[in-house]
Image (tube, grey):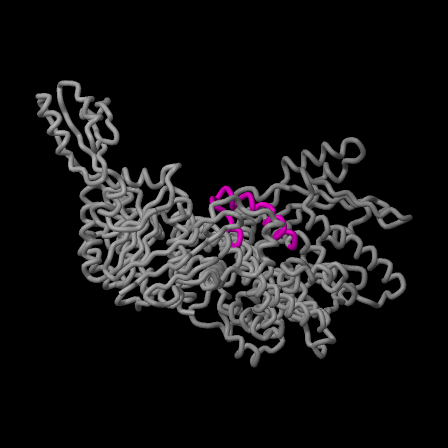
C-alpha cells in the first residue's frame, strides 16, 4: 500500500509539473470561453443582429404596423431582461419585493410566460406610449413598463450603483422612400439596390447604419390564398430576423381571422397568450426536472472522454519512457507489478480530478470577467448538482470510466517498446474509444431505447453510456446491472493490466498479437 | 556469513532457457564480478535476484530469506540511466530511498549528504536532464545505496564514466565492501573486474562456465613469455615446456610463447644464452582476465 501511494504521488507530481499539463488545463476552459463569448463580443453570436429595414406594404399598411409591433415587442423583452440584470446587480431585491412586489416578481423571472405583457401593463395608465392603441385589429405593442420599473427601483437602489442604460436597438425601422414604394415589376430590384446604397437610419452626428432589408407585402396579401411576402436583403438572409418577419405576418393573418369571429377580443389578449411547460418525472414523485439533470451527465460524459484521453496518453508515454531508461527495473526491484499499476492509475485519477477542479475554477473566473452574476451562478450550479440524486452514480461511473480507459492505455504502454510502437497500438484503440462520442446524438434522442440499452452492455462503454442515460432514469435493473458490470469491468481491467504489465514491461520483443495477448491473460499469472 | 545463495536456478522463456541450473553463493563483504557475453543470462539472473522474475526451478535466498521479504535491503543500479529526466537530483535519490522504506525527510537529507560527498552538492536541485552523463550516473549509483542496503547489485556501473570518475567509483565500491556490504556487479570491462573483484563468475548461454578467485581464473590458461630479439628465435618453439610460439606481428613486437603449467620460462633464457642470442626484452606473466574470458566463452569452450 505504501509503495502504491508513493508511486501515485510521484506520478501525480510528474504530470502536474509538466508545462504541457498547465497548457492543457488552461486551454480547455479558454477554448470554451472563446466558443461562447467571442461570437457574443463580436456580435456574431447574439440573438439578433442589427438590421435597418423598411416595409413596402401595398395592402394598405396593416401588415407594416404588425411588423413594427413585433419588433417593438421583441425590444420590450430585451429591455425587461436588461432591467432584471441591472436590478440583480444594483438593487436590494428583498426590499423591492416589499415595496413593489409585482415589479420584483417580474424582474426575478423576466422569461416567465406573460412577463412582457405584465411589463407593458405596468405603465398602461402612466407614461406615454409610442403607439398608444390596443383596440381590436390595431397594434398590440403599446406601452412600456420601464418608467414604472425605474420608479420602483429608485427606492431600493444600492449606493454607488451603476447607471442603467437602455439596451441598443437591434432592429431599426425607417419609412420606405417614394421611389421604392412606386417601383414595381422588373424595375423593383434596381430600386432596392438604390435604397440599399443611399438610405440609412437617422444618426446623431453622421448617418446611421445603412438600410439592409426590404419587406414587400403584396396588395392582395392574405386574400385568395396569396400568403407570399417578399424579403429582400443583400447576401444570405439573417434567419432570426426572417423568422421574426414570417411569424409576425402569420400572426397578423391569424388575428384578422380571429377578429372576424370574435371582434371583441383585443390583439393584446391574443398575442400575449402564452403557456409554460414544466417537465416532470413520475419516477421522482413528479418533481420538476432542472436543466442540470441532463446537462451535468452529458458534460461529465464528454469531460470523461477528454480527461481520460488527455491524461492516459501521458501515462502511456511515461511507461514507454520508463522502459527505455530502465527506470521500470528500479520500480520493479522495489514494488510488485500490481502496486506499480495501481499507483500509476491512482496518480492519473488524481491528475484528472485536479484537472476538473482547475477547469471549473478557470471557467468560473473567466465567467466572472464576463458577467457580474458569477457568485450567484456558482452557488446555483453547485446547489443544483449537489441536490441531484444521480450524483453518486455519476461519480461512480466517472471513476470507473477513468480507470478502464487508464488501464487500457497503461497496458498498451507496457507492451510498446517505443512511442512508434505505442502509436500503432493507440490508433485502433482510439477508434474503439471514440465510438460512444459519435453515438451521443442518437442516444440522447431516445436514452432508454433499444440502441442505448444494447450499447450499455458493452463493458468498456458502460460508464460512458450510463452517464448519458442517467438523467432519463433508466429501469432500475439496468442501472444496477450497469453498476455491477462497470465495477466488474474495472476490476478485471486493473487485474489484466497488472498481468500484461508484469509479462511485457521488461521484454524488448514486438508487441504481442491479440490472440497471444488473450491467451496470456487467460493463463495463470507468473507470480 | 552467506548473503546470497542460488541453488540450481533455471529460468525459461517459452522454449528458450535463459538461465540453466545456476548455483553460486556470496559471502558478506565480498565483491563478485558477474561476467558474460551478451545474451549469457546475466540480466535475467540479476532480475531473479531482485525478485522481478521468479525462477522456474531452483531456489534463491538473499540474506537468508526469500527475495520478496528483503527487497528493501537490496540496492540496484540498472545499466541505463534509470531515473526520471525531469526530477531534481536530490529528489530522484530520495524517491528511490522512500520506495526502499525510508521516510521522505531523512531520505532527502541523506541524498544531499551523499551528493555533497560525491562533489555534486551544487547540483542537488538540478534536474537529471541538466546533468552530464557522468553526473547522472553518479546520481544513479547514489540512488542504489542511499538506503544503506546490505546487498548491492550494480549492472555496468562504469558505463559512461571518464577515467577519473571510474577511479572514484571504484574507490566508492571498495568503501562499500569495506563497510560490510556485499556487492555483485556485472560488466564487460575486464580491467574493472581485475581491479575490484574478489571472485568472478563467468556465464555463457545461461550456464556457469567458471566461478572462483582471479588467481584461479588466470590459472585456467598457461603462463605466457614474451621475448624481444633482433635475431630469429623461432628455435625456442622446440624448447621443453613451450606449447606454442607466435612470431612478432603488427602491434605486437615480441615473440609470444605459451608455457606449460608450472613452467617459469628459465629454460627459454638458458636456450638463448647457449646460442649467444642477445635479448632486448623478456617477461613471463600470467594470462589476463580478458584472455581467460575469451577462452571460457568462446564457441568451443566447455563448462568448467
Do we see residue A282 in this rendering?
yes
Lateral position of residue B144 relative to residue A415, left or right: left
B17 vs A137, nearest the viewer: B17
Q: What's drawn in magenta, residue-wise?
A: A410-436
Instruction: Report the quarter where the N terminus of chain A lies.
Output: bottom left
How far across and down, in percent of the image, does residue A222 sit? 86, 50
Instruction: Name the residue located 39 percent from the left edge and 37 percent from the top edge.
Output: B300
- The image position of residue B257, as x and y in percent, is 21, 30
Left or right: residue A392 compared with residue A68 = left
- Give the side of residue B103 with respect to residue A471, left or right: left
* Residue B96: percent from left, percent from top: 33, 60
Q: Is residue A306 left or right of residue B61?
A: right
Q: How many marks can you see?
A: 0
Residue A386 coordinates in the image, percent (x, y):
56, 73
Foreground: B9 or B86? B9
Residue for point 14% across, 31% down: B267
Nearest the viewer among A27 and A337 is A337
Q: Residue furthest right?
A: A224
Report which quarter residue A146 is drawn in: bottom right
Asked if the stretch drawn in magenta spans residue A61, the answer is no
Residue at image location 30% in from the left, 41% down from the top: B293
The structure residue drawn at horizontal position 18% and vertical position 37%, both measured from the top left corner, is B263
Compared to residue B218, the image places residue B237 above or below, namely above
Query: In this orientation, which residue lies closer to the viewer: B50 or A365?
Result: B50
Could you tell me if residue A368 is visible in this image?
Answer: no
Q: Residue furthest bottom?
A: A98
For residue A419: magenta? yes
Amino acid at each position: 500500500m505504501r509503495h502504491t501511494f508513493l508511486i501515485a504521488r510521484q506520478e501525480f507530481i510528474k504530470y502536474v509539473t509538466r508545462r504541457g499539463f498547465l497548457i492543457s488545463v488552461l486551454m480547455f476552459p479558454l477554448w470554451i470561453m472563446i466558443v461562447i463569448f467571442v461570437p457574443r463580443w463580436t456580435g456574431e453570436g447574439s440573438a439578433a443582429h442589427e438590421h435597418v429595414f423598411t416595409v413596402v406594404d401595398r395592402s394598405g399598411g396593416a401588415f407594416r404596423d404588425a411588423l413594427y409591433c413585433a419588433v417593438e415587442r421583441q425590444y420590450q423583452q430585451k429591455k425587461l431582461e436588461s432591467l432584471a440584470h441591472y436590478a440583480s446587480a444594483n438593487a436590494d431585491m428583498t426590499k423591492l419585493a416589499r415595496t413593489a412586489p409585482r415589479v420584483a416578481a417580474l424582474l426575478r423571472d423576466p422569461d416567465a410566460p406573460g412577463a412582457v405583457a405584465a411589463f407593458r401593463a405596468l405603465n398602461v395608465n402612466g407614461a406615454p406610449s409610442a403607439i398608444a392603441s390596443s383596440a381590436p385589429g390595431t397594434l398590440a405593442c403599446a406601452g412600456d413598463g420601464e418608467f414604472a420599473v425605474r420608479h420602483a427601483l429608485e427606492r431600493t437602489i444600492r449606493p454607488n450603483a451603476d447607471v442603467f442604460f437602455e439596451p441598443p436597438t437591434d432592429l431599426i425601422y425607417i419609412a420606405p422612400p417614394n421611389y421604392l414604394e412606386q417601383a414595381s415589376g422588373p424595375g423593383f430590384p434596381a430600386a432596392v439596390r438604390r435604397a440599399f446604397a443611399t438610405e440609412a437610419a437617422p444618426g446623431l452626428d453622421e448617418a446611421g447604419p445603412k438600410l439592409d432589408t426590404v419587406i414587400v407585402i403584396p396588395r392582395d396579401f392574405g386574400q385568395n390564398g396569396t400568403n407570399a411576402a417578399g424579403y429582400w436583403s443583400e447576401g444570405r438572409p439573417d434567419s432570426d430576423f426572417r423568422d421574426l418577419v414570417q411569424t409576425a405576418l402569420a400572426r397578423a393573418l391569424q388575428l384578422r381571422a380571429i377578429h372576424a369571429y370574435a371582434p371583441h377580443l383585443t390583439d393584446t389578449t391574443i398575442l400575449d397568450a402564452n403557456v409554460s411547460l414544466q417537465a416532470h418525472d413520475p419516477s421522482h414523485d413528479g418533481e420538476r426536472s432542472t436543466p442540470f439533470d441532463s446537462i451535468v451527465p452529458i458534460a461529465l460524459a464528454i469531460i470523461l472522454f477528454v480527461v481520460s484521453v488527455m491524461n492516459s496518453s501521458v501515462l502511456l508515454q511515461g511507461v514507454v519512457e520508463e522502459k527505455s531508461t530502465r527506470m521500470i527495473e528500479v520500480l520493479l526491484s522495489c514494488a510488485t507489478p500490481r502496486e506499480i499499476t495501481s499507483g500509476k492509475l491512482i496518480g492519473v485519477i488524481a491528475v484528472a480530478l485536479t484537472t476538473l477542479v482547475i477547469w471549473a475554477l478557470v471557467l468560473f473566473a473567466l465567467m466572472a470577467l464576463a458577467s457580474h452574476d458569477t457568485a450567484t451562478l456558482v452557488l446555483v450550479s453547485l446547489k443544483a448538482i449537489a441536490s441531484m440524486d444521480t450524483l453518486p452514480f455519476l461519480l461512480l461511473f466517472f471513476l470507473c470510466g477513468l480507470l478502464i480507459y487508464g488501464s487500457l492505455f497503461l497496458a498498451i504502454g507496457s507492451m510498446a517498446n517505443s512511442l512508434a510502437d505505442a502509436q500503432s497500438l493507440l490508433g485502433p484503440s482510439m477508434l474503439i474509444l471514440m465510438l460512444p462520442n459519435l453515438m451521443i446524438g442518437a442516444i440522447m434522442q431516445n436514452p432508454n431505447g433499444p440502441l442505448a440499452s444494447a450499447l450499455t452492455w458493452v463493458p468498456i462503454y458502460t460508464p460512458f453510456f450510463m452517464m448519458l442515460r442517467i438523467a432519463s432514469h433508466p429501469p432500475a435493473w439496468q442501472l444496477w446491472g450497469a453498476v455491477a458490470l462497470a465495477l466488474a469491468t474495472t476490476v478485471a481491467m486493473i487485474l489484466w493490466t497488472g498481468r500484461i504489465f508484469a509479462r511485457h514491461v521488461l521484454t524488448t520483443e514486438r508487441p504481442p498479437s491479440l490472440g497471444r495477448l488473450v491467451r496470456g491473460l487467460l493463463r495463470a499469472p507468473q507470480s | 556469513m552467506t548473503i546470497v545463495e542460488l541453488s540450481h536456478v533455471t529460468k525459461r522463456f517459452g522454449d528458450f532457457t535463459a538461465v540453466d541450473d545456476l548455483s553460486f553463493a556470496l559471502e558478506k563483504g565480498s565483491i563478485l564480478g558477474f561476467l558474460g557475453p551478451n545474451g549469457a543470462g546475466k540480466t535475467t539472473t540479476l532480475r531473479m535476484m531482485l525478485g522481478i522474475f521468479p525462477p522456474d526451478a531452483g531456489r534463491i535466498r538473499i540474506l537468508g530469506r526469500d527475495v520478496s521479504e528483503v527487497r528493501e535491503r537490496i540496492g540496484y543500479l540498472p545499466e541505463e540511466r534509470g531515473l526520471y529526466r525531469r526530477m531534481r537530483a536530490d529528489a530522484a535519490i530520495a524517491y528511490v530511498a522512500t520506495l526502499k522504506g525510508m521516510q521522505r525527510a531523512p531520505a532527502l537529507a541523506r541524498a544531499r549528504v551523499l551528493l555533497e560527498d560525491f562533489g555534486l552538492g551544487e547540483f542537488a536541485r538540478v534536474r537529471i536532464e541538466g546533468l552530464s552523463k557522468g553526473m547522472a550516473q553518479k546520481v544513479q549509483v547514489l540512488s542504489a545505496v542511499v538506503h544503506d542496503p546490505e546487498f548491492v547489485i550494480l549492472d555496468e556501473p562504469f558505463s559512461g564514466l571518464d577515467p577519473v570518475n571510474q577511479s572514484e567509483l571504484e574507490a566508492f565500491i571498495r568503501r562499500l565492501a569495506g563497510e560490510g556490504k556485499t556487492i555483485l556487479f556485472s560488466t564487460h570491462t575486464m580491467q574493472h573486474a581485475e581491479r575490484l573483484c574478489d571472485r568472478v563468475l563467468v556465464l555463457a548461454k545461461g550456464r556457469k562456465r567458471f566461478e572462483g578467485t582471479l588467481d584461479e581464473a588466470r590459472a585456467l590458461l598457461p603462463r605466457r613469455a614474451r621475448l624481444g630479439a633482433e635475431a630469429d628465435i623461432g628455435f625456442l618453439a622446440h624448447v621443453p615446456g613451450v606449447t606454442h610460439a607466435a612470431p612478432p606481428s603488427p602491434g605486437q613486437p615480441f615473440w609470444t610463447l605459451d608455457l606449460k603449467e608450472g613452467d617459469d620460462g628459465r629454460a627459454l633464457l638458458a636456450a638463448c644464452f647457449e646460442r649467444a642470442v642477445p635479448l632486448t626484452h623478456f617477461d613471463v606473466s600470467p594470462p589476463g582476465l580478458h584472455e581467460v574470458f575469451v577462452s571460457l566463452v568462446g564457441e568451443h569452450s566447455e563448462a568448467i
